[in-house]
Amino acid sequence: MTQPQRRRTLAVLILATVFLLGLDLSRPGSTSFVRTGAAAALGPLETAMTAGRNEDVVRLTHERDELEVARLQDEANLRQARGVTSLLASPSAKGATLLAARVVAFTPATSSDDRRVTIDVGSRDGVTKDLTVIAGGGLVGRVIVVAEWTSDVLIVGDRNLTVGVRVGAEGRLGSVSARASLAVTPSEPGRLSLALLEHGTVVVGDWVTTLGSVGGRPFMAGIPVGTVVSVDPDHGQLTSTAVVEPAVRIATLDVVAVVLSTQRSLPRHPVLSPTK
Amino acid sequence: MSSPISLLGLLRAALVVLAAALSTVVLPRVGSLGPDLVLLVVVAAGLLGGPTRGALVGLGAGWVVDLMPPAAATLGVAALTYATAGAVSGLWHRDGSRSVFLPPLATLAAASTVAALGILRAVASGWAVHWVAAGWSIALTTAVGVAVVPILIRTERQLIRRGPA
């Protein structure tokens, strides 16, 4: 290739890139086939590069639970495995089908500020878009891209993710996101910002759990999101805001579970209120 | 005549995919900050072939970074960023020069370009700017580049020399 030819190729390719970027920004769903195709090709490579396979982890987790040889195993793994088990037993997960998965890749710190992970289950395992992903500690995020063998998960802490929540024992409504609301100094990285819908008091130590969506998609109700660690001073913001420490430590995320279904199978019966 | 170019292209493509996979699979488990491995391949191409070649390789490498699962929120951002970085590193291209100072300088310039574009994007979008992380990224990438870029250049030179024979 001569120099002018190379320049022309570069110009055409840059134009094509700018066009795709514009398309992606203006119609977010329109380029999903590119992501899905790339994930189908590159996802298995990432899975192969992660030492130990999913089946091993699941089998080992079961063995650990059954034989109670837990203390001999990796402590971090064990904590998460126990967390998933306890989550399975929690009322909110009752009737839900969970699919165990392993985190195989993270968004590199060098290329962008997105907070996403890739897990090693995909459409072949029954994963579809907008399913809730949980870990031992609580909420991880929701599935946004599904390939055959892997899926991308938008995790708590991404600036594009806002979660409707209930706060404290009274269950006040609010929302949690990575972006700090106006008039409040941005919190340190890794922390989340909580904004109540109406005026109310939040105290340090309050539990924050998901509000839930219709049909449990994208978020099931009652999953721990984090704890309130500090309440922002009143600088004239419309409602109370606070800083939340996430329940799940993203940096050490390993075993997670995709909530496949929360569909009720039993009809709800109407009840008569007592007359006296 | 086309075979040596495609062999070199194949090597670069394999290196870019490997570097992108390492950056998503291995580096995040080691620490929250790490060197930009993909950029080193781009810098080597720019140093060897000039701004246009650097930008072309950068564009391709950026697309791999964008598409490597978990795929970026907006496709094409990394592609344009790395294309710019490739062109910047190509500015240090000197015909036949084997100076030991050029690779670190080009890496520093390219890493600074990537960091500057990231900061620019954050400022334009009203996001928090992570100055310390950007500084560490430049420092780590340059430090690794001092060792890796000359090896890449030497390998690519050998491939080019052996190619036509």
Image (tube, helix red, strand yellow):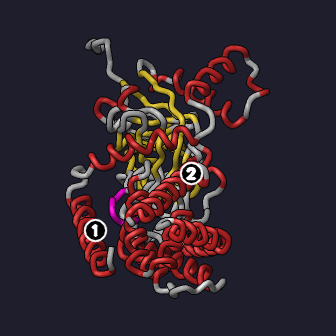
Seen at 57% across and 72% down, the residue is: B153
Q: Report the amino acid beneath label 2.
A: Glu
Q: Identify residue for label 1.
A: A13
Which is closer to the viewer, label 2 or label 1? Answer: 1
Q: Are marks 2 and 1 in contact (CB under 8 Å)?
A: no
Where residue A266 appears, as percent x and y from the top left, is: 31, 12
Real-space Cα separation, disc 2 to disc 1, in angstroms: 43 Å
Residue A268 is one of the magenta-drawn residues: no
Seen at 72% across and 14% down, the residue is: A67
Numbered disc 2: secondary structure: strand
Q: Report the amino acid beneath label 1.
A: Leu
Residue B126 lies, with reference to residue B28, above or below; the image says below
Q: Identify residue for label 2.
A: A245
- Ranked by sequence position, the earlier of labels 2 and 1 is 1
Residue B36 lies, with reference to residue A96, above or below; the image says below
Residue B74 is one of the magenta-drawn residues: yes
Image quarter (top left, top right, bottom left or bottom right) of the N terminus of chain B: bottom left
Q: Tell me where residue A84 sits by quadrant.
A: top right
Span highlighted in magenta in the image: B73-78
**Chain of the residue on which disc 2 is drawn:** A
